[in-house]
Image (cartoon, grey):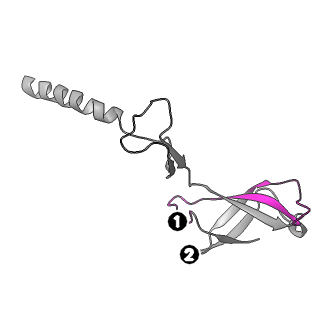
Amino acid sequence: MLRQGIAQVQLNSALAPRERKRIRTPFDGVVTDRLISVGERYNEPAPMLVVARIDPLHIEAYLPAAQRSTAAHRQSAKIIPEAGGTPQAVINVIDPVLDAATGTYGARLALTSPDGAFYGQRVTLRF
């Protein structure tokens, strides 16, 4: 029994350096940029990767000024992605300023996508 305890302590001390080098993020996401290359010396306070959260997805849309009076905060919209399906998104930001040159205004919608199925796709909005 004593040998087993000693072996467990030795195993834990051998695994500790590897565990300190494990990379973890505080949320699930997708790596969008590597800031260091393989073989480079890592300076601990510096970031190594850029990770993007993909749930919820944010959809940036430019809508016609004529629809400005019909769009409302927390209004839902049907999303038609390139790959198919009809998920629902919710408007969470409406730009209060109209772009006179294009006759549009900006809106941001949130789309719940726990499996990341809609990441990187173009979508069509239907209100």
Kindly identify the residue that appears in the image at 56 percent across and 50 percent down. 53
Asked if residue 47 lies left or right of residue 125, the reply is left
User: Where residue 74 appears, x then y in whole percent?
Assistant: 76, 57
Q: Is residue 67 above or below residue 2?
A: below
The magenta segment is: 92-119
Three-letter code for the amino acid on which mark 1 is drawn: Ala
Frontmost residue, 28 versus 51: 51
SS for callout 2: loop
The mark nearer the N terminus, 2 or 1, is 2
Kindly identify the residue that appears in the image at 83 percent across and 54 percent down. 95
Q: Quadrant of residue 54?
A: bottom right
Frontmost residue, 45 versus 24: 45
User: Where residue 31 appears, x then y in whole percent?
Assistant: 49, 51
Badge 1: residue crowd in 10 Å (few <14, some 14–19, many ≥20):
few
Kindly identify the residue that appears in the image at 90 percent across and 64 percent down. 101
User: Where residue 124 appears, x then y in whole percent?
Assistant: 69, 73
Q: Which residue is mark 2?
A: 83
Magenta stretch: includes residue 127? no
Three-letter code for the amino acid on which mark 2 is drawn: Ala
